Amino acid sequence: MRIEVRVEIRPTESEAKVKRALMNLFDFDEIEVEEFKEIKFLVGKGKGAKCLSKLYEALRRQQILDAARQYLEKGRELTGVRFYLHKQAAYAGKVSFCSFEYSESPLGAIVVYVETSDPDAFIDWLTPRTIDGKPVGERKPPDP
């Protein structure tokens, strides 16, 4: 399982604060700034469940597994899962999903892509089904 997280750093934003937003929810192996024309992006990359451990715990702490599962299922692709997180919520250490990259997060969303050979197993691990808000059938992370 490979994870790539990309977020635009707007001219009015502090690079350090955007980095903090990412670090609140992810534990990357590497993080760097990329520039495309005049636009700067912060790109974090990692492998395995360790990279997603903060997100994993936050989803359970906030008790939003059912809602999160719906967003992940909508973002299922043949070789992975793509989803969007609200940048300002991430800065506050909270998980809030967006439907699209630019519609619900005025400063642009955090774009998360998880490459995995089994997107369904990934979704079941990160956001298991629940009964009365409690996870049932917790699984081991896919693609060690």
Image: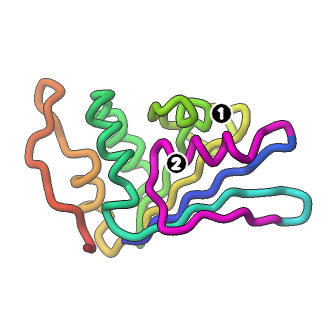
Residue 58 belongs to magenta span: no
The residue positioned 48% from the left and 61% from the top of the image is: 28
**From mark 1 to mark 2, how far is it between C-alphas?**
18 Å
Screen quadrant of the N terminus: bottom left
Q: Locate residue 143 relative to residue 87 in the image: left or right.
A: left
Q: Name the residue under label 2.
A: 23
Three-letter code, disc 1:
Ser
State whether residue 98 appears in this view. yes
The kind of secondary structure element at disc 1 is loop
Q: How many labels does the image show?
A: 2
Res 108 → quadrant: top right
Left or right? Give the position of 129 relative to 59: left
Would residue 36 be found to the left or right of residue 1 on screen? Answer: right
For residue 105, the mark is 1
Q: In which quarter of the image is residue 95?
A: top left
Q: What element carries label 2?
A: helix
Q: For the magenta stretch, what is the residue range?
A: 12-35
Whether 66 is drawn above or below 16: the answer is above
> Counting other residues with Cα less than 10 Å from the Cα at mark 2, is it few (<14), some (14-19), or many (20 or more)?
some
Q: Residue 92 carries which label?
A: none
Observer-nearest of 69 and 107: 107
Q: Which of marks 1 and 2 is nearer the N terminus?
A: 2
34 in magenta: yes
